Amino acid sequence: MKCAYHPEKDAIYKCNHCAKEICSDCLVEEKHEMYCKDCFISKTQGKKSVERSPALAALLSFIIPGLGQIYNGQVGKCLLIFFTGLLVIPWVIGIFDAYNTAKSINEGKIEGKHRIGCLIAFVVGVVVFMMGIFFMAMISAIAIPNLLQARLNANQSAAEATVRTISTAAETYHGVDGKYPLSEANLTEASPAYLTQSYNHKEIFGYIISEEFQESGYKIVAAPKACGTSGRKLFTMETGGVFNSQDCSSVNY
């Protein structure tokens, strides 16, 4: 039997792929398999067509644990890394693994395959990830302002209640002694006490309380520590229990 490429030479081998009879000059051996030159070139070109980018594989694994493994066609490994990614260490290992695997595919150490399912999974994963970011942003945009407003309302309610409490104590003191207290100490140190705690110059739920006492009257102010952040209203109680509320941005205090 003559060689399919050199009719003048005897064939001593057979290509494992196309079964052509070939001589020793036409033989290409790889991984204990014998190929003719044409089949070996086709096999080599097929490997090149499934090359992977190590940098892209690592980047995908950094964005979503296991996404780089899907890119490399390793679905099982992807699932393992994805479900353990919250432990951080598997996530980091997955980034390096994706990079090294892509590099090995390009070097021919690992056989790469065309897997349309992996590509679809990759696209779906990216879409799901982007949608997740979008919905989280939407939820945050709705929830955060509501939470801030709820905190402001709570602070303002507590500040208003505080100035009313101090005013009530001062008016009660006046009803008993016929004059207003000269200081908060007259209210807290009396027996029984008109106030159970001290408020003057202290922060109460984001508001700073200030008091002015004299025998003829008093003025109590609750001002937000940070206007617009800890509260938007400034509250005032004056002699006779006269209450006033105004926007803190319009007042210098």
Image (tube, rainbow, N blue to C red):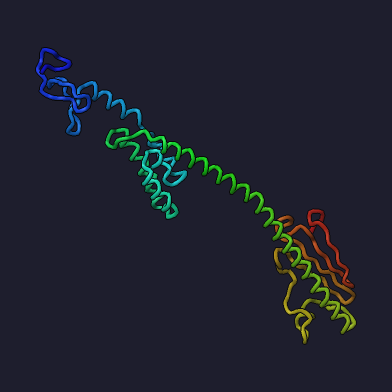
21 displayed left or right of 166: left
* Residue 17: x %, y % from top left: 22, 27
Q: Residue at x 33, y 40 (%)?
A: 101
User: Residue 237: x, y in percent?
Assistant: 84, 68
Q: Quadrant of residue 183?
A: bottom right
The answer to which quarter of the image holds residue 67 is top left
Residue furthest top in the image? 8
Q: Is residue 3 above or below residue 166?
A: above
**Residue 176 location (% of width, % of height):** 87, 84
**Above or below 237: residue 134:** above
Say how many tags the image has: 0
Q: Is residue 213 left or right of residue 83?
A: right
| Front-most of residues 32 and 13 | 13
Location of residue 123 with respect to 159 vertically, above or below: above
Task: Tell me residue 29's x, y (percent).
Answer: 17, 28
Q: Residue furthest bottom?
A: 191
Which residue is painted at 27% across and 36% down in the image?
A: 109
Figure quadrant of the N terminus: top left
Q: Quadrant of the C terminus?
A: bottom right
| Nearer the observer, 158 or 240 | 158
